[in-house]
Amino acid sequence: MDEIAPSAPVFSSTSISSNDSTPTITGTAEAGSTVKLFSGTTKLGEATADSNGEFSITTSSLSDGSYSLTATATDAAGNTSSSSSALSITIDTTSSNAPIFD
């Protein structure tokens, strides 16, 4: 019986600024594990890491502001990793990066 927890997930970046209120967060974790993304204790989304250990999670809607996100990985045996290092993310949907049409 597998009683060893997987390693904590690793984000592809350490900080993100976005004008999208539902950004996609990527990283790596144990292949086949379920990765859950959190802001504090609020779960923002989850995905299964592929055979290469890569995951991609599109968050639930976030209000403008700064967040510190973490993730955990749970393997097929139900063992859960410790929390990942934090990912700093800033959401600003009022930024002027949107295209302007005449």
Image: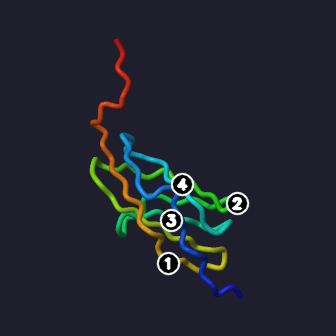
Q: Residue at x 46, y 74 (%)?
A: 83
Q: Which residue is mark 3?
A: 36
SS type, badge 1:
loop
Give the CA separation, mark 1 to mark 3.
12 Å
Q: Position of residue 23 (x, y in %)?
A: 44, 47
Q: Which residue is mark 4?
A: 26
Of marks 2 and 4, which one's residue comes earlier in the chain? 4
Q: Residue at x 29, y 49 (%)?
A: 63
| Residue type highlighted by circle 2 | Asn
Q: Which residue is mark 1?
A: 82
Residue 55 falls in image quadrant: bottom right
Q: Position of residue 19 (x, y in %)?
A: 36, 40
Quadrant (top left, top right, bottom left, bottom right) of the C terminus: top left
| Residue type highlighted by circle 1 | Ser
Of marks 3 and 4, which one's residue comes earlier in the chain? 4
Q: Residue at x 60, y 66 (%)?
A: 29
Left or right for 86, reference 32: left
- Colour scheme in use: rainbow
Mark 1 vs mark 3: give the one in front.
1
**Cβ–Cβ below 8 Å for labels 3 and 2?**
no
Left or right for 85, reference 80: left
Give the CA separation, mark 2 to mark 4.
13 Å
Q: Residues within 10 Å of mark 2 (few under 14, many from 20)?
A: few
Q: Which residue is mark 2?
A: 52
In this view, the residue in front, 60 or 51, is 51
Of marks 2 and 1, which one's residue comes earlier in the chain? 2
Of marks 4 and 1, which one's residue comes earlier in the chain? 4
